[in-house]
Image (tube, rainbow, N blue to C red):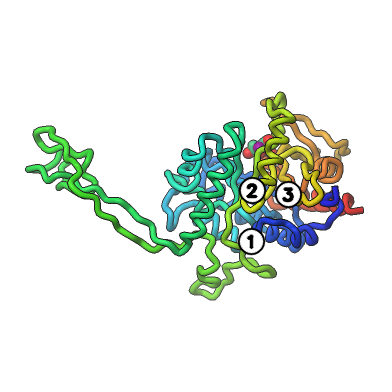
Amino acid sequence: HPTLLQPYSERAKTATHPLSRYLFRLMDLKASNLCLSADVITARELLALADKVGPSIVVLKTHYDLISGWDYNPQTGTGVKLAALARKHGFLIFEDRKFVDIGKTVQMQYTAGTARIIEWAHITNANIDAGKDMVRAMAEAAANWKARIHYEVKTSVSVGTPVAGQFEDGEEQNNNALDDRDSDGRKGSIVSITTVTQSFEPADSPRLAKTNEHGDELVFPGIEEPPMDRGLLLLAQMSSKGCLMTKDYTQACVEAAREHKDFVMGYVAQEALNSAPDDNFIHMTPGCKLPPPGEEENGHVEGDGLGQQYNTPAKLINILGTDIVIVGRGIIQAADPPSEAERYRRKAWKAYLTRLG
Ligand code: 5IU
């Protein structure tokens, strides 16, 4: 397929999704086709790792639900801090949430709840086992989100029935009194709903300050900030042994991607899936590891004993034709993660240059 032999800088011009166009340019600028899978166990480690490895990567992949101490505050929490690091170092955030449910439910999981993934993750992914309408549902949620940028958040405040006396917990009745009971054990009930509006600027907004009070640059130089768009990767193939995703399933992903080019950036897959003449989707590939320095490479590296299987960047990028390698433990568990990340970046970039010929 033509995209296998095209430089990322060329693919930046023809990709449909604004965030894909941006990402291809960023890859070209940073000479990086590396994504770090930041699977550490605390928010503190996550932020420190993102700050140290940021210069080597173009995408940071998260699993917010395996991080303890994730701060959900929409103005100052972990998502917002990650977004600030993404601006500073020039990478996109990819929450590996693997959404799978009916359309209405994924809309709510994507935009609301505790983590409000859409607010801080440029990219997320979905398993379309439940049917491809769910992609449309997520696209709709993302479009609504974008339309509300610099929008107002409406918070409903429930006001309980004034009941006599002090409440069990010793507090006066407050605005969230529904769970409170008076000294006779009677519960409050809703008498009215008021709506409070606040203005809210998304965590990656280009409208945010570009320098801090000391004059330090807060934005990665050399390229403008990413567009305020959200993108989806379809989970077309997995790296794990015995994966049950069939060829038909993978093909359904390809069809869903083509139907939703404005929202679907590409795939998480183990090989290139572009096949129609004008396909220009991006492929990100986990299950990537290098043998220790000095050891010979033959494309394959021993798995982790829990089903994970590994290929080298050379095999994934040059032979199987994917675009971005996703590396977790290969980097995180190294003695010096930033220098190991550089070793992966160089190898993966070299594999890409070799593919171009
Ligand atoms: N991951 C996979 N394989 C897949 C998909 C996601 O390993 O097919 I989709 C995730 C799981 C983990 C990371 O977060 O990518 C790989 O981590 P290691 O490089 O540590 O194996």
**Residue 228 percent coordinates (x, y):** 57, 61
Q: Is residue 310 above or below residue 24?
A: above
Q: Is residue 73 above or below residue 129?
A: below
Can residue 333 be seen here? no
Q: Nearer the viewer, mark 2 or mark 3?
A: 2
Q: Is mark 2 within 8 Å of ligand 1?
A: no
The kind of residue tagged 3 is Phe
Q: Nearer the viewer, residue 117 or 17?
A: 17
Q: Nearer the viewer, residue 301 or 174?
A: 174
The kind of residue tagged 1 is His
Q: Seen in the image, is 253 located left or right of residue 122? A: right
**Residue 41 percent coordinates (x, y):** 54, 40
Q: Report helix, strand or loop for mark 3.
A: loop
Give the numbered dot on residue 281.
3
Task: Name the residue beneath numbered marker 2.
Answer: 260
The span from disc 2 to disc 3 (Cα, nearest Å) is 11 Å
Give the numbered dot on residue 208.
none
Residue at x 62%, y 51% (from the top left corner): 263
Looking at the rendering, which quadrant does residue 27 occupy? Answer: bottom right
Task: Name the residue beneath numbered marker 1.
Answer: 89
Residue at x 58%, y 46% (from the top left corner): 95
Q: Nearer the viewer, mark 2 or mark 1?
A: 2
Residue at x 58%, y 38% (from the top left corner): 98
- Image quadrant of ligand 1 equals top right
Q: Residues within 10 Å of mark 3 (few under 14, many from 20)?
A: many
**Residue 218 percent coordinates (x, y):** 57, 68
The span from disc 2 to disc 1 (Cα, nearest Å) is 30 Å
Residue at the limit of the structure toward the bottom, as seen here: 215
The kind of residue tagged 2 is His
Can residue 167 be seen here? yes
Q: Is mark 3 within 8 Å of ligand 1?
A: no
